[in-house]
Image (cartoon, rainbow, N blue to C red):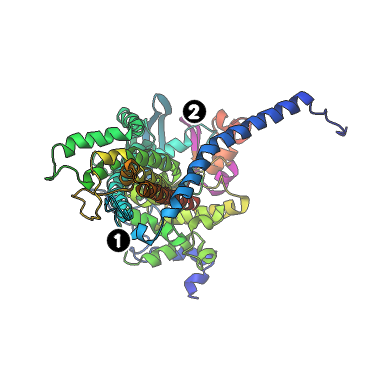
Amino acid sequence: MTPDETTKTTSEASDRQPTDGPASGSTRPLAQVPDVSVRPARGGGGHAVKVRGLNAYYGDLHSIKGVDLDCPANEVTALIGPSGSGKSTVVRCINRMHEEIPGARAEGSVTLDELDVYGPGVDVTSVRRLIGMVFQKPNPFPTMSIFDNVAAGLRLTGTKSDDLRELVHRSLRGVGLWDEVKDRLNEPGIGLSGGQQQRLCIARTVAVEPEVILMDEPASALDPVSTLKVEELIDELKERYTIVIVTHNMQQAARIADSTVFMLDGEVIEVGPTNDIFTNPKDERTERYVSGKFG
Amino acid sequence: MTVSKLPEISARRRRTDKFMRGTLVAAFVLALIPLVLVIYYLIYKGIGTWSKSFFTTDPNGNFFGYPGGARSAILGSIEIVGLASLISIPIGIGVALYLVEYGKQTAFANFVRYLTDVMTGVPSIVFGLFIYIVLVEAKVGGSGFTAWKGSIAVALLMLPVVARSAEVVLLLVPGSLREAALALGAPRWRVVWRIVLPTARSGLVTGSLLAIARGMGETAPLLFTTAGVFGLTFNLNAQMNAMPLQIYNDILSPRTEVNNRAWGIALVLVTLILILNLLARAVSRRSRVA
């Protein structure tokens, strides 16, 4: 066993620093997208997401009505709100997954640092490489082994990697799954438990080294123990990534988010540091929601 | 309060239940009778003709003596349907991919779906006549009747079967897998190639095998296109024998031995189709979707 394989939570953070990238603290370049000016971000190498005047439609249904949103680099931004308030739609607009739904369209601006995500000539696949996504239900590829699932992102984007094995191993260590699966990397990914599958999906997302990770209720299909593991993981991941998370679970938002956004009927009602939203909300509707009086 | 007794089932309900069950069993048996009789007669009449020479010699057309076996017919069928499969399966799966991954519910996609349904209902002899007019009469490729023209007629017949079954299977691939792959930044063609097709593979194989079985038994598309000959040939640009054609010829003969050979070939044909169906079932049992 190499020292790497025995890592515990305390040392994992340093392990996940890029070994092949520039020294930590400096900003990693936004790969793959031409003409991108990158502003040095706070803390690690993260990048900020800015949403301005976002309107989204499903056919004739106007579901997002002029949303502004700031997701600072290397922070966890949580979106809370009742079902149908548009949290998932907002998140799906950030990496342009929204437009995959037939009849759906979005207007407004989403920027990653200086990069206009909806800009003309911007390749949607490059956008999604920079802005990864984890879904509500764990969705490992059923035909692939654990190893191949993690490597899938690179293979699917046609990226050549000098050391695929090392990258896969590092990604699995990064999500704390290594010790559980290291002896069965060639077994099917769907053979894992739900919580392990979800961490596998996060490893798959991390392996393509995005700048931002969007999470759409990543723990709502998991048991409490697995949920805790995913939450701990999110807390570690924010050292390297900017994280936007949709959650139905207000305790979860309170535990992991730096700032929280309360949405209602396709509009942002209130934004603030998580603590303020839960203990001292300014809007009456926020107060009623976080205290469980509706929603 | 505890539950001690429920009302008894009334005699009328019990009678109705018995009657309806009886009706269903009777319908099932009725439907089974022709199937069992066909298989029984095939085996009863056909198995006696199976011998080493049945599988190793070709029909010779002699009026006296041993009429020859069925080798050229069996191999000819495999060649013709093999080429037809090479044509129809990739195109059929391609059509299904277009409908599921790109066309979706657009007017054009629905038009294609409608045409595919219509094509499924076209009698097989129409495909034969179509190829006869377009390729045989026009002597495309230098000669009139050739095996490859038969393959195209059979391929036309198989195409809608492949396309429709593949569409059903592709629709069963969960959208969440496509989303997962797209969210990783994969271009759509790679999502199709590396995620959708592998996930649907066994279902696609099943549908294709059933289409092959369907194409194997068709006589009409071959009558006007390949025009059977007795001899064995591997030249697809020549006339070729095939099982349905040989059966067709043999039952017209006044000789009992030749008539019997038709039963033997029919048994081979049904056995092959049975094997293909069993294969299809075995493959679909290992399926990851459906």
Q: Which residue has dot 1 on it?
A: A160
In the image, residue B111 lies at what x, y percent?
Answer: 31, 28
Q: Note whether residue B21 is visible.
A: yes
Amino acid carrying label 1: it is Lys
Residue at figure coordinates x 60%, y 44% from the top left:
A251
Residue at figure coordinates x 44%, y 65% from the top left:
A169
Element marked by disc 1? loop
Magenta residue check for A261: yes
Residue at figure coordinates x 25%, y 43% from the top left:
B150
The residue nearer to you, when weighing A264 against A164, is: A164
Task: Answer few, some or many: residues within 10 Å of disc 1's Cα (few below 14, many 20 plus, some between 14 and 19).
Answer: few
In the image, residue B268 lies at what x, y percent?
Answer: 40, 51
In the image, residue B205 lies at what x, y percent?
Answer: 40, 49
Quarter holding the C terminus of chain A?
top right
* Mark 1 or 2, nearer chain start: 1
Amino acid carrying label 2: it is Asp
Count of marks placed on residues: 2
The residue nearer to you, when weighing B20 against B59, is: B59
Magenta residue check for A198: no
Q: Quadrant of residue B155?
A: top left
Which range of residues does the magenta coloring cover? A250-271
Decide: is B111 above or below B190.
above
Left or right, residue A69 beside residue A257: left
Q: Note whether residue A242 is visible.
A: no
Q: Which residue has dot 2 on it?
A: A265
Decide: is B20 above or below B276.
above
Left or right, residue B246 beside residue A67: left
